[in-house]
Amino acid sequence: MSKVVALSGGIGSGKTTVREILAELGATTVCADAIVHAIQVPGTGILETIAEAFGPEVIDADGQLDRAALGGVVFADASARARLGAIMHPPVMAEMARQADEGLQSGSPLVVMDIPLYFEGLRSGTGSAAARNYDAALLVWVPSEVQVERTMARDHCDRAEAERRVAAQMPIDEKRDYATHIIDNSGDRDATRDQTAKVFAELTAAPG
């Protein structure tokens, strides 16, 4: 029987890399961030709701969402993050559930739900973690200093801003306590692939 598992990490941990490897190994992957981007476009109604909540400055001159401007607001304010979550969570979870069920019906050996704040929800008993009973919880882990360095490189921001973004999330070391499987992504891709392949083999092994 196919399993549905949650995949999460922290900003700069390299969760996308692990998700891509799992897809290469044969898993069906469902990415919350990709769904978020797909529904935050003009004409869906979500963009208008975001503009009403955070002001017209989060919409760029082309009428698209200015993600940098929105990020500057929500990373600096916990209440703003909660407000954005309340807007995005219902439609994102509905689409994730639809894609997961599609993967199960197709006979995929493993359905991987890539959920950025999964462990935060697991700790609080709310949100994505409470929406479905997952068969496993995979944590993509790196030291917090690596998170900072990778965030600086990815987002082209200074150290202070990267540290603020990392600090806005649940500490990655605390997430280890809630994970059933931990993949250390602080080395090279081959090392990460070897660990990921072992987890995939374990989760897809026939019972008995």
Image (cartoon, rainbow, N blue to C red):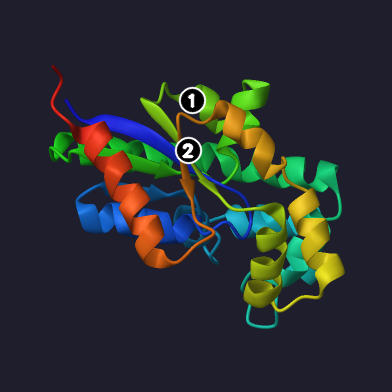
Residue 45: horizontal and vertical position, in percent? 57, 55
- The dot on residue 93 is 2
Depth check, front residue: 172 or 186: 186
**Which residue is label 1 attached to?**
131
In the rendered view, tell whether residue 45 sits above or below residue 117.
below
Q: Is residue 169 visible?
A: yes
117 relative to 184 in the view: left or right: right
Classify the position of the C terminus by image quarter.
top left
Amino acid residing under circle 1: Ala
Q: Residues within 10 Å of mark 1 (few under 14, many from 20)?
A: few
Picture residue at 86% right of the left edge, 55% below the top: 76
Depth check, front residue: 156 or 194: 194
Location of residue 94 (image quadrant): top left
Amino acid residing under circle 2: Met
Depth check, front residue: 3 or 195: 195
Picture residue at 49% right of the left edge, 62% below the top: 187
86 relative to 165 in the view: left or right: left
Among the two numbered marks 1 and 2 on one chain, the one whose residue lies closer to the N terminus: 2
Residue 3: horizontal and vertical position, in percent? 27, 30
Do the residues under discs 1 and 2 have CB atoms within 8 angstroms? yes
- The dot on residue 74 is none
For the residues labelled 1 and 2, the Cα–Cα distance comes to: 8 Å
Classify the position of the N terminus by image quarter.
top left
Residue 85: horizontal and vertical position, in percent? 67, 42
